[in-house]
């Protein structure tokens, strides 16, 4: 099963460049059968630009999560802690086997979906 994640273009590009190996989330999908993430690059790109497989998902206190992921986080420490401000737990999706599409796809036209706030399941 796949999920669609909205990711800022700067971070989405780092994922496909291989410099960001973790995608951070405040909330995570509940379905344990999710194995792939389809990446929607948010404004100003507003296109589906690729996908990746999920290696594993870490769930921990943000301070401990940062210690485990900082080397390949693709973001600054200050941005990380600002993102998780006042949260008791966070999630880090470990990226593997990325595939950037040769032609970005229109979310509405190709998937008949609108951009999710967090994520949405794809069949």
Image (cartoon, rainbow, N blue to C red):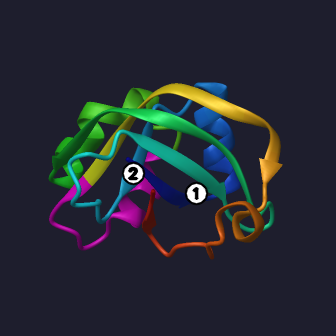
**Crowd tier of the residue under label 1, counting other residues whose Cα lies within 10 Å: few below 14, some 14–19, many 20 or above:** many
Residue 32 image label: none
CB atoms at circles 1 and 2 under 8 Å apart?
no
Q: Is residue 24 magenta?
A: no
Residue 87 horizontal/vertical position (percent):
22, 69
Q: Nearer the viewer, residue 66 or 12?
A: 12
Residue at 25% over, 32% down:
68
Q: Nearer the viewer, residue 20 or 31?
A: 31
Q: Which residue lies under the disc numbered 1?
A: 7
Q: Secondary structure at mark 2?
A: strand
Residue at 72% over, 60% down:
110
Residue 47 horizontal/vertical position (percent):
75, 58
Query: Residue 64 occupies which quadrant of the picture?
Result: top left
Q: Is 103 displayed left or right of 4 in the figure?
A: right
Q: Which residue lies under the disc numbered 2?
A: 24
Q: Which residues are magenta?
A: 76-90
Q: Is 15 displayed left or right of 120 in the figure?
A: right
Residue 73 horizontal/vertical position (percent):
44, 37
Residue 14 horizontal/vertical position (percent):
63, 36
Q: How many numbered callouts?
A: 2
């Amino acid at each position: 099963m796949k999920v669609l994640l909205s990711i800022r273009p700067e971070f989405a590009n780092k994922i496909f460049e291989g410099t960001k190996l973790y995608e951070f989330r405040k909330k995570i999908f509940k379905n344990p059968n999710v194995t792939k993430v389809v990446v929607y690059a948010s404004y100003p790109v507003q296109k589906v630009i690729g996908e990746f497989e999920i290696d594993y998902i870490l769930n921990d206190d943000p301070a401990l999560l940062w210690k485990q992921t900082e080397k390949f986080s693709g973001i600054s420490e200050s941005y990380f802690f600002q993102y998780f401000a006042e949260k008791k737990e966070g999630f880090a999706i470990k990226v593997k086997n990325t595939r950037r599409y040769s032609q970005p796809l229109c979310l509405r036209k190709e998937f008949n979906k609108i951009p999710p706030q967090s994520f949405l399941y794809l069949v």
